[in-house]
Image: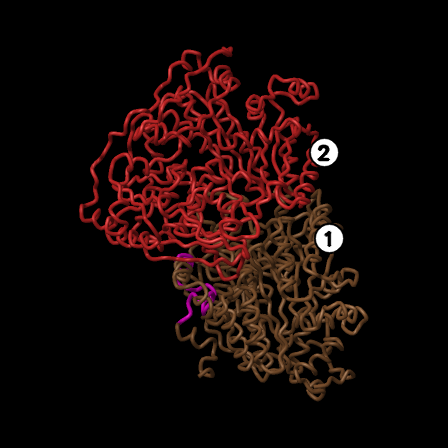
Chain colours: A red, B brown
Amino acid sequence: MVADPDVRPNWYEGPLPEKSFRSIFRWGNPGQFKHPNRGLVALMQEMLGVSPEQLSEPVSFGLDQVAVDPPIRLTAAQIERFEGIVGPGNVQADGYARLRASYGQGMIDALRLREGVVESLPDVVLHPRDKRDVADILAYCHQEGIPVYVVSGRSSVTRGCEAVQGGVSLDMSTHMNQVLAVNEINQTVTVQPGIFGPALEQALNQAHARFGARNAYTCGHFPQSFEFSTVGGWVATRGAGQNSTYYGKIEDMVLALEVVTPVGALKTQDFPRQATGPDIDQVLIGSEGAFGVLVEVTLKVFRHMPENTRRFSYMFKTWEDAQQAAREIMQAEAGFPSVFRISDPEETEVAMRMYGIAGTPAETLLAALGYRSGQKCLLLGTTDGDRTFSINLRRKIRQVCRSYRAFPLTAFGVTQRWEHSRFLDPYMRDDLADFGVLIDTLECAVTWESLPEVHAGVRAVIKARPETVCMTHISHFYPQGANLYFIFITKYQDRMDYLRLQYAVLDAIQQHGAAVSHHHGVGKALAPWLPGQVGQAHMDVLRALKQHFDPKGIMNPGGTLGLDMSVEQREQRWGLGEQQE
Amino acid sequence: MVADPDVRPNWYEGPLPEKSFRSIFRWGNPGQFKHPNRGLVALMQEMLGVSPEQLSEPVSFGLDQVAVDPPIRLTAAQIERFEGIVGPGNVQADGYARLRASYGQGMIDALRLREGVVESLPDVVLHPRDKRDVADILAYCHQEGIPVYVVSGRSSVTRGCEAVQGGVSLDMSTHMNQVLAVNEINQTVTVQPGIFGPALEQALNQAHARFGARNAYTCGHFPQSFEFSTVGGWVATRGAGQNSTYYGKIEDMVLALEVVTPVGALKTQDFPRQATGPDIDQVLIGSEGAFGVLVEVTLKVFRHMPENTRRFSYMFKTWEDAQQAAREIMQAEAGFPSVFRISDPEETEVAMRMYGIAGTPAETLLAALGYRSGQKCLLLGTTDGDRTFSINLRRKIRQVCRSYRAFPLTAFGVTQRWEHSRFLDPYMRDDLADFGVLIDTLECAVTWESLPEVHAGVRAVIKARPETVCMTHISHFYPQGANLYFIFITKYQDRMDYLRLQYAVLDAIQQHGAAVSHHHGVGKALAPWLPGQVGQAHMDVLRALKQHFDPKGIMNPGGTLGLDMSVEQREQRWGLGEQQE
């Protein structure tokens, strides 16, 4: 289809009505927008077959007020008891609050809410004030057999916080959001789990003024959800920030934590390493609320030295070259870059449009030099750390990239443009969905050896759908492997149409030997694929831990990590079973 | 006491009689010796109060043949079954083999054997040929309730392999000692657990010739026991090599493992990171044979580039300066050194003697410049990695050390001398014990903040014993903390005298807030201190895991990790309870 360059969709910038469905599913700050630019609108027409008509008629903005208010299954006495624990002002029982606590940022959440489908609500939302409140709530819920869900940033994309069995949802972000201590000698910070990324980062950047520290610090953890996710969520899911190649994933940053479980509290110690048996931190990190509630976390912090950050970007002739160069950089023992990303040919094309290089003389030059559309691949990144370390590493990266025939783009400011939009791109999702186009992501973990097969195999499944864009990048690197992050954009009919696509991609991820998640976590949505990946003996260990921490199965019940998923549930895959045969 | 410089103790260099007690407790290669030099002999007289007479009369060389052969409690049918599994040639039932499989390299092991005390023996020693043998053995032992111990390098210093309840000991080093695969794309090696350090390192260094690899590799893991310990032991105990500050501890190197437990096998996957729930590798690493038997391990490997190693050494005016400089180096974000060690004032004095600097003009110069005996502290180390990384980091280290008033000793070759003797120093232990002097070590993990108190508190306990040398170093560093390694040398009466000292040191380690082990592991010897460190809730998690993997309690039973230690056992602390009141 030939694009009409003058089409300007009527992107919604109207008010976000109070208590509307849109106010729940819409990403980010209400007053913040990033609409698809002309290049992307053209792409929607060319590659997705979206007609100018479709771009002029929104499907639905989801502006209706949430009117649902299903009956509360808790007794009055139970609610009174919760009020006694957290105080009456910290118990919410209205339909809007209940819905808001249950739905996250998965595409399936937004699609359900756009369709007005309300499947799972907690009976009440509680806002614990401190860890004693959490302990009292859990002891009571354990006694009464009341399901407990935990929510804070509401940015889960895995149905992680969905209260599928009702009960209570604990919102940790309301009160339990403080920095408790900065320890400059140990270079650690201790926080409550409900603290959001920016509040933590600001406290660390301003450690001199706020804590009398000699240096400024950074948390080093910047997921795309950074502004709207919390430390507790990062830890519960084994999250990763966009700079994890240098700073590590959250499981590399946690030194100690305190968790309240139905059978009591457990607090670990902040030694960086020890040889005293199994590592219990690594049992609790990634337990996704199925064992207990995090109430305190001690994290590593890092010297904040933004003046030392160096940027780089290169264009490679092939995906193979880009991968090999990235692997060589990771295995060269010269230190690791901080932001580090390579885009496959299809993502590179889109990036060229987004970063304004497509159609410029630079692109013509690249083509003339043999960097061809549909083959060329973009690498971009930064180096952090001590000044000489950062400079030396960037020099090493240049050397490796050149040896793989890369063309330096550093002068074009590609990395700066990526940085500028790093937290803004998610805003486009709602714009697209308003006009019947879904953009969703699935990501997985691979070894270097399995990477090419997983990339090709998963792409083949996505591209088998007509008029579908599939952009892939690698954004978290290790000497032994990496992640693969697939973004797919396509017109959609309804949520079942979406789920069929999502499940086909997950099947392909599994079939080609990748881990089902590198940093999004498993939650309830991906749980049907976990046993197939890790095997029965591994699942049995998880179940033994579950049985220990939560003998009555009240913590995040209904499928989390596949722990209490029936065979039927697993086969039905969240309601799609019937449609499949 | 004034030393007689001419005393030359009659160090034993005679034959190591076959099947003698000495052949079991004696460290290392039978033909290899490193006797205390003149400086140390003088020190023994000056500081330990050892008389010239004592140095001329050895207490005992332990040359008697092992004559013990306690009854075997297994039935003939059971032994026949084991012979059916591993083949008759792989079942040993003689007293010497049984004793050898049970005793390790703890001081208490050597002292017992010198005294001819045989407390714990397995009934038979089995040499499994492959993982199927291990599975068959475990299934049968589970059925019959027969205790299972695992042994390979026999270098445990924590009674880790001691068969306190009889049963079978599996020697993994006999057959299951092969490199199974080198994967150059992923930079990993997969091995059987019974492979010794040198065999692994040689295979990696020679990867070009042996596996057709493009590069040479190193395992990066060089504990002092390197020559006489195996990968399985490293993993089972959460060991660390002397270069762990750069390469990481073993738990940072394991990518995947396969373990056979009484209830079946479990194999994990080799993704470098993932977000698929709790990390089961980190449950099995450090489980010290209490959950199952390792049968395969996949480890990270690193490019072998010894040509890039750079050495450095500095003298600081105070222990405080040395610590602060080391912490600054670790927190500076310039990369981590490889070998990295600081010695406290007492160890520095001994090192000056050992490295031949004491009494030279260099020492006079140092004193004149204010680096005083009893206060000054030695720092030494190396940098590894890519050439420019290594050079840049050494430059940074120099800069930091100078800012803390350090005097550069690099020209004196101190680090080279340390390297030369890094695997030889343990040979002196038996020489000293031959003449009634014990040298033993205890090590722990600390945060930077707790380090000074732990150092002072533990030292105070050791130095309270008259005529006792206490040398302390830090040899494993993190941005958030370090280890502390105490070496104590003193005359001893008998093993109860030794145990009283060891227990007092362990009490002090715990009382001042350190973790009871950084890399030796807990075993049975340190287990009485584990609950006091980690707390009851943590112990309950370990017990739940134990119950899952080993419901009948047959794996390394009798106190390992405190899992099946009775209150009496814990209070009695291996037989010292009676003596204490």
Q: Nearer the viewer, residue A381 or B71?
A: A381
Residue B386, label in figure: none
> Which x, y percent locates residue A175?
35, 47
> Which x, y percent locates residue A343?
58, 29
Most prominent secondary structure in the magenta stretch? loop
User: Which residue sits furthest left?
Assistant: A76
**Would you place residue B429 above or below residue A342 in this image?**
below
Amino acid type at circle 1 is Thr
C-alpha gap between disc 1 and disc 2: 25 Å
Residue span colored magenta: B545-566
Residue B309, label in figure: 1
Residue A403, label in figure: 2
Chain to which mark 2 belongs: A
**Would you place residue A119 above or below residue B223 in this image?**
above
Amino acid type at circle 2 is Ser
| Residue B475 appears in view | yes
User: Which residue sits furthest front?
Assistant: A209
Judged left or right of residue B41, residue A310 is: left
Magenta span contains residue B563: yes
Which quadrant would the C terminus of chain A be assigned to in this image? top left
Element type at mark 2: helix
> Which x, y percent locates residue A295?
39, 51
Image quadrant in which you'd find residue B568: bottom left
**Would you place residue A469 above or below residue A383 in this image?**
above
Q: Residue at x 52, y 30 (%)?
A: A421
